[in-house]
Image (cartoon, coloured by chain):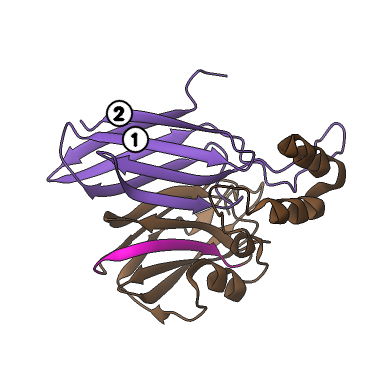
Chain colours: A brown, B purple
Amino acid sequence: MQRRHFLKNTIATGTVAMAAASGLLVPVQVLAWNKEAFDAKDVASAMKGAVGTDSAEVSDKIKIKAPDIAENGAVVPVTISSTLKDVTSITIISEKNGTPLIAKFNLHGAEAFVSTRIKMGKTSNIIAVCESGGKFYKTHKEVKVTIGGCGG
Amino acid sequence: MAKKSMKVRAKAKNGIVTVKALISHPMETGLRKDKKTGEILPALFIEEVSCEHNGKLVMQAEWGVAVSKNPYLSFKFAGASGDAVKLSWKDNTGKGDSLETKVK
């Protein structure tokens, strides 16, 4: 019943209402999806929401594999790997997306390797944040997005 | 729609299992408009993906709307051939699916 109501609201009044409605619904959900962080509009608050801090040491032990030029911003393949020890989480942020936080992978013993495909609004830096031993390390890579262009 | 919402492959090599998964899901951001009606399409996206290796959680991901449509995901963990791998996802409407497979 509640969900039906929630869906109705969403369709009727769009995303703003949805933000409010699902905000109210958070305690009901089994999983506390990190709403605040994913709704954040700038990199600093997205990072703060996702990993608890907006400062991270720049590290060359993290590698981002992504195309230099992405012809289609809707599908940008990104692979993040790290040689840091005991990486417990990998967070992917796209600097100039409306909501920069893309995904956070919590690793419980898995290797420091994640590969996925993301959406990018426009040319921007991809930031990868790795958590290792309670400390945060980051690196970034620029991806040029040419929407509807010929890749030039 | 096809019966299964996801495809999962897991392969072991030198003690490391590589899991590759494809999930069919629209991953709607809630910002796009329907081209015909002009109405905003409601957000519909995967919030959580988790993977269990022999019943133990090894990876749990939180996703936002910026993960591409029909998401692809790959990750690695220590394991061996024959192990059980279970991948599950859940979207913002509470819908979800899970698939269990054996490591090759």
Q: Quadrant of residue A106?
A: bottom left
Q: Amino acid at mark 2?
A: Thr
Pick the front one: B99 or A76: B99
Task: Count all numbered tags in the image, as a single digit.
Answer: 2
Q: Are marks 2 and 1 in contact (CB under 8 Å)?
A: yes
Left or right of A40, for residue B102: left
The residue at which mark 2 appears reads as B101
Residue B104, horizontal then vertical, whole percent: 20, 30
Image quadrant holding the N terminus of chain B, namely top right
The residue positioned 18% from the left and 39% from the top of the image is: B12
Q: Quadrant of residue A1?
A: top right
Left or right of A85, for residue A102: right
As helix, strand or loop, the secondary structure at mark 1 comes to strand
Pick the front one: B18 or B56: B56
The residue positioned 46% from the left and 44% from the top of the image is: B49
The residue at which mark 1 appears reads as B86
Residue A12, horizontal then vertical, whole percent: 86, 41
Magenta segment range?
Answer: A85-95
Is A87 a magenta residue? yes
